[in-house]
Image (tube, coloured by chain):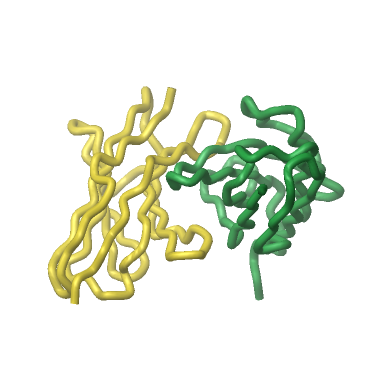
Chain colours: A yellow, B green
Amino acid sequence: AQSVTQPDIHITVSEGASLELRCNYSYGATPYLFWYVQSPGQGLQLLLKYFSGDTLVQGIKGFEAEFKRSQSSFNLRKPSVHWSDAAEYFCAVGGIRRDMRFGAGTRLTVKP
Amino acid sequence: DTAVSQTPKYLVTQMGNDKSIKCEQNLGHDTMYWYKQDSKKFLKIMFSYNNKELIINETVPNRFSPKSPDKAHLNLHINSLELGDSAVYFCASSVLGSYEQYFGPGTRLTVT
């Protein structure tokens, strides 16, 4: 069955520092992978997605993610974090029934 | 313009009551979903509908009944509410066959 693991429950970075959030997936075929962000009290916003092709995908708000099949990973990165990036980040894999299987989320805190 | 909207945003009710949450999308999508986010932020799919037809029905108590009057609306009715039903419920929509889902802002349900 498709599943996603986000190993880090909570990450704290300083404003201006680089960020990498980890995501590992389990899926038999080529996965459809997503990163969503949830700001406090808000819904989920799609940051970026990977379906096929170039393994480095660019998203909104300066985020990017790299698909690595050999490591079953789809890590999210940002070169310089802003205070407004503080939020909950969810990695997800598309299920065979077109539903979305989410990881447990990583909470990002940004220190001034 | 709101793409996926939910009402109400907050719902506080007592155990044993029956309540409904409404969802509407103006994206022209033909598939809609309900997800539940528990207190640990874990997101899990409950139902999905395509053109008013139920296509995903996860292991959810039959106290939960989705209703889709047309493809732009998917409502969630919950009978005999229990404390464990307290959560944030998210509606989402997509085009059939697409993994890209757009989420509503969520409805925070508190059962006392």
B75 left or right, relative to B93: right
A105 left or right, relative to B72: left
Q: Quadrant of the C terminus of chain A?
A: bottom left
- State the image coordinates of residue B57 (x, y, percent, origin top left): 67, 29
Residue B92 makes an appearance in the image: no
Considering depth in this image, is A86 or B93 the residue closer to the camera?
A86
Residue B94 higher or lower than B78, as above or below? below
Residue A79 higher or lower than A72, as above or below? below
- State the image coordinates of residue B106 (x, y, percent, origin top left): 60, 57
Q: Residue at x 49, y 58 (%)?
A: A44
- State the image coordinates of residue B54 (x, y, percent, origin top left): 75, 33
Considering depth in this image, is B58 or B37 the residue closer to the camera?
B37
Q: Residue at x 31, y 55 (%)?
A: A107
Residue A111 higher or lower than A12, as above or below? below
> Picture quarter containing residue A17?
bottom left
Residue that lies at the very extreme toward the right in this rendered image: B69
Residue B12 makes an appearance in the image: yes
- State the image coordinates of residue A93 (x, y, percent, origin top left): 42, 38
Q: Residue at x 49, y 33 (%)?
A: A95
Q: Quadrant of the N terminus of chain A?
A: top left
